[in-house]
Every structure is written in structure tokens, then in C-alpha cells.
Image (tube, helix red, strand yellow):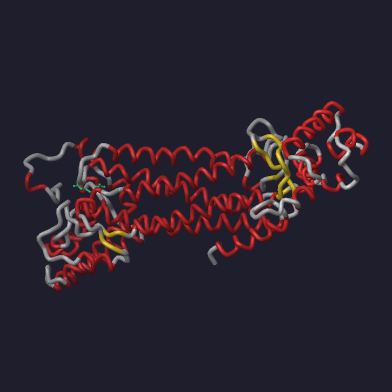
Amino acid sequence: MAKLWGGRFTKETNKLVEEFTASISFDQKLALEDVEGSLAHVKMLGETGIIPLDDVDLITEGLLKIKSKIENGEMEYSVEHEDIHMNIEKQLIDLIGPAGGKLHTGRSRNDQVATDMHLYLNRKTKEMIRLVNSVQEALLLRAKDNVDTIIPGYTHLQRAQPVSFAHHLMAYFWMFERDKDRLQDSLKRVNWSPLGAGALAGTTFPIDRQRSAELLGFDTVYPNSIDAVSDRDFIVEFLSIGSLIMTHISRLSEEMVIWSSQEFQFIELDDSFCTGSSIMPQKKNPDVPELLRAKTGRVYGNLVSLLTVLKGLPLAYNKDMQEDKEGMFDTVETLEGSLQLLAPMIETMTVNKETMRKAVNQDFSNATDIADYLVTKGVAFRDAHEVIGKIVLYALQENKFLLDLKMEEFKHFSPLFEEDIYRVLSPEHVVGARESYGGTSQVQVKEQILLAEEKVLG
Ligand code: ARG
């Protein structure tokens, strides 16, 4: 079949080469963006008098027909036309005749593909902001029910100090808040228009790049045509933000796997989010959080893969850059699927408040508070630490927890202990006493939730 660029060639393209170099199997996802870019380009060509208005009308009409074919899933693509840009241009020419051939005036596929990618990521970044926000809403909802729920807080996965379960959930809220902020900030760079940069050097036609940028809703245009067609930083940035989002999803998923284990039983995932075992009838497996944790790998891979593609490339466009797409689509789809599942999984999990409370009763996570108790009575923290270390060792030997120790046992270690030590050591008091800004006291957690509510998009 005749190629749009066939003039200089005397031989047919080798079939394997055609397959190998074509991107139509995946870049058809950019079909609507491609039409959108062309509509703006042709309007600008008309306004600047570069092509006659009759042709502009014909081309516009043709493009709109193609657009509805795409939307209705009726579009047919062929590998002979290599990519989405040439497939659409060929269909346009078939549809409206030779006038269709004027669409490509003053542009190249190099600025065209970059424009498509910018438009696509603009749309997807905004969608991602909404999805991250819905996970934040789910976290906030569960945090509100659990301000007074106490769980052991861990460092090194060893019991450290008890915390409000809401406080723990809200830690994830703030991670996602920063992700949302990163996505929002990245839009500043996604919103540069490469259109009109041509192959790399600009064009001899009196085009108006500002106008086509404005028609497409871009904030600004790339000031350098070489940079415009060579830049894939905005995709790297998206893949990198996506990697961080997956890191956060993965850490939360890991906790869900641990918390739902027989050993912890802090939460139970809803049946609708779990699967069974083909051999062990008792099993209820946390497949969803496990897969979320695992899918993080491919998202990191997509980032490293694009960075690697770009690192050795001379300016300007190189065919290597066609490899920017599949990883990007994969990251977009993985993120969409993951965020969409995470929100309802959080919303429907059962929180076993009693089990959590029992866990807190059976540990030494109130030890810091006895040290603080002695400090308020004038003992230096380092000395208090030493005394409490000895008390813990003694309690362990006696097979007791701190609240089980009798008054005389406390007094044996320091005469400064009084009856009020028992109140100080209760988990409610231990949590409630951490009133420093951002701490886990119920008062502080409620303040935090108020602040968080302002961050959630309506
Ligand atoms: N399919 C190509 C890509 O995705 C479009 C740009 C092709 N440009 C070129 N000079 N061959 O990168």
C-alpha cells in the first residue's frame, strides 16, 4: 500500500519492518487527542491565511466525522499506516479528497505526537487527582469513626507506643495529599504546547503557535522548537509521581495484609475483596492488597524504562521516543485500577476495635510514659530511661505487664512513684497525653481531621 511518505522510496517496506516500527497497536489510545490537535491546527492555518477557508471547513468536517467514528468504536486502523497520526490523515484524505493533504502544512509528526501526549497526560493527570482524592475521602471517613480506637504503634515492627487508629490512617491521607499536590504541580509543565515546532526547527509558514495553544487550552508554548519535540520530561515526571503513589498504596496494602492475618486480626477485609483457596477451605486471602503491592513493580519499571530510553538520545526526535507510550499507558491503567479498588476496600473493611484494644493491654508500649512521669517529678530523662529499663526487665522476668505491678514494686525502683501512675499508664491516657501539634492525642487527631477536610476536593 502507498505510504504517505512513499515518494522517496523505490521498494516496498519489509513486512517485519512494518510490524516492528508501527505503533498503531498502542498509540490508537491517542486518537481523540490527535483529532483535537488537528482541529486546532487547521483552525489556526485558516485564521493565518495559510490555507483557504473552504479547505479548513472540509478538513474540519472530515475530522469531526473521524472523531465520531472513534467515539463509536467504528474506526479501523492499519499497520501499513504505521501510527495514529498517519492512520487518521489517510482516512481524512480518503474521506474528503486532496484537501485532506493540506492538514499537515506547517507541522510534523514530531510536534504532533508530542502535542497528543501533552493533551493525553493533561486529561489523565486531572483524572488521577480525582481518584487519589477519593482514596483520601475513604481514609477520612474511617479515621472519623476511629479517633478513640487505640492500636499499638510500631517502629521496626516492634510495639513502640500506642496510637489512635485514626492517626495511623491519616498518615496515609497526608502521603496522598502530597501526591495530589505533585500531580497538580506537574500540570504546569504538562500544559506547554509543542505544536508548531515542526520536525525540530520551526516552519517557514507564518503560523501562530500561541493561537493553536490557546485553542487547545495550553497555558504556554515551548520557546524552543528543538526542546519542544525532544522533551519527554513531563512523561518521566508523571511516571515518577505514579511510582510514589504506588509506593504509598503498596505500604498501606502491606499493612492490610498484616492486619488481616490470623496473628493480628486488627481488620477484616470485606468478603467481596477477598478470594478463597482451591485446596484449603478455611482460607480467605487478601489478594487485592497483595496485587496492589505487586503492581508497584511494573510502575517503577515503566519509570526506569523511559529514563533509560532517554538517557543517551541526541537531540532532537529519535524513533526511540516512540517507546515512551506503552509504559505510560500501563502506568495510567495500573494507577486507575489500583486507586479505584483501594477506596472501596478501605470503606468496607471491618475494624476490630476490641482486638486492637486487647493488643495494647498486652505490651510495654506505655514504658515511655513512666519515664516521662519521673521526668515531671524532676528526674533527668536519661536517668529515668535507665530506671524504666530495669522495671521492664523485672516485669518480663515476673511475667507481668507494667499495669500489673504493685505499688511497692514501683516504689522499689523509685520513691517518686505515687498511686496516679496507674492512671498515667492506661492506654487512653498514654494516647491522650500526646498533645503536641501533630501528635496522636484525640484532641490533636480531631484538629488534624478538620484540616484534612479542607484539603478534600468537593
Ligand atoms: N509514532 C511516532 C512516535 O510515537 C510518531 C512520530 C514519528 N516521527 C518520525 N519522525 N518518525 O514517536
Q: Position of residue 423 (x, y in %)?
A: 85, 48
User: 337 or 388: nearer the eye?
Assistant: 388
| 291 lies left or right of 430 | left
User: Residue, x 86% and y 40% (percent of image)?
Assistant: 403
Q: Quadrant of residue 443?
A: bottom right
How many marks overall? 0
Depth order, front residue of 49/9: 49
| Residue 29, position as x, y percentages in the image | 34, 52
Residue 359 seen from this side:
no
Residue 129 at x, y percent in the picture = 47, 57
Place of residue 162 in the rendered image (x, y in percent of width and height, measured from the top left): 73, 44
Would you identify the image quadrant in which residue 305 lies? top left
* Residue drawn where x is 49% and y is 47% of the image: 245
Q: Between residue 70 and residue 156, name the one nearer to us.
A: 156
Quadrant of the rendered image containing residue 454: bottom right
Q: Is residue 41 above or below residue 76?
A: below
